[in-house]
Amino acid sequence: MGPVELLAGNATRAVELELAGYQWMTATGFVGFANTVAAHLGRAMLELDRNEEAEQWATTAREIATGDDPAAVGPALGVAARVRARRGEFVEAEQLGREAVASFDGTDFIDQEAAAHADLADVLRIAGRNDDEAHELRAAGRPAGYDFVYTSSLEIVSGGNPDLKEEKSDNYTVGAVFTPSFSTSSRVRPFGALYR
């Protein structure tokens, strides 16, 4: 629910929800999703201008994430990039932002990839690189001059993943219709099976 609150512009509530979720997950040993929640916490903290806490949560997300989990690593890198840009550390911020975008290469996380492009655009905006910012905003499906607001719901034009192959399967369906004995018809209808 935290990301929904963040989309609604209520970053304070997003922090409350994500923090409660993270604490429950770590207390109960259900840590498989905790890395993504930590990344969400970092983004919500960032929207509240709580930069140090945002960076700490981004670091936590990256530390507990598996290396192949772009849902946690990508947003965490994006948050870290924006924090560094706010400090004026533009070279490192851009590097982190580009790592965030690259973390989605070969995945079908198109909305999160677009958010990573938007994070990088924000880094470039802060650095005063308007042409590069405009390029990243286009990659994110956002118009030039976009006033940065977090969203994971984007209008974008995209094609499918060219590396995906068609899937084949064998399906079997069996059905039957029975008429109870107390019915006016005592006949059992035959059934068939379709095989491919």
Image (tube, grey):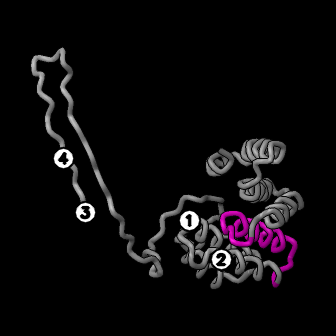
Q: Is residue 47 visible?
A: no
Disc 2 is placed on an element classified as: helix
Disc 2 target residue: 101
Specify the amino acid type for callout 4: Gly
Q: Position of residue 156 (x, y in %)?
A: 48, 69
| Mark closer to the chain start, 1 or 2 | 2
Q: Amino acid at mark 3?
A: Arg
What is the C-alpha distance between the residues marked 4 and 2? 52 Å
Q: Residues within 10 Å of mark 3 (few under 14, many from 20)?
A: few
Residue 174, placed above or below residue 111: above
Give whichever of discs 4 and 2 has the lower sequence position.
2
Q: Which residue is mark 1?
A: 111
Q: Residues within 10 Å of mark 4 (few under 14, many from 20)?
A: few
Q: What residue do we see at 53% from left, 70% from top?
A: 108
Residue that badge 3 annotates = 196
Write the residue at 69% across / 71% down.
68
Check contact, mark 4 vs mark 3: CB within 8 A: no
Q: Is residue 196 magenta?
A: no
Foreground disc of the pair 3, 2: 3
Magenta stretch: give its range.
67-91
Q: Is residue 74 magenta?
A: yes
Q: Which mark is residue 192?
A: 4
Q: Is residue 186 visible in this depiction of the protein?
A: yes
> What amino acid is labelled 2 in the image?
Val
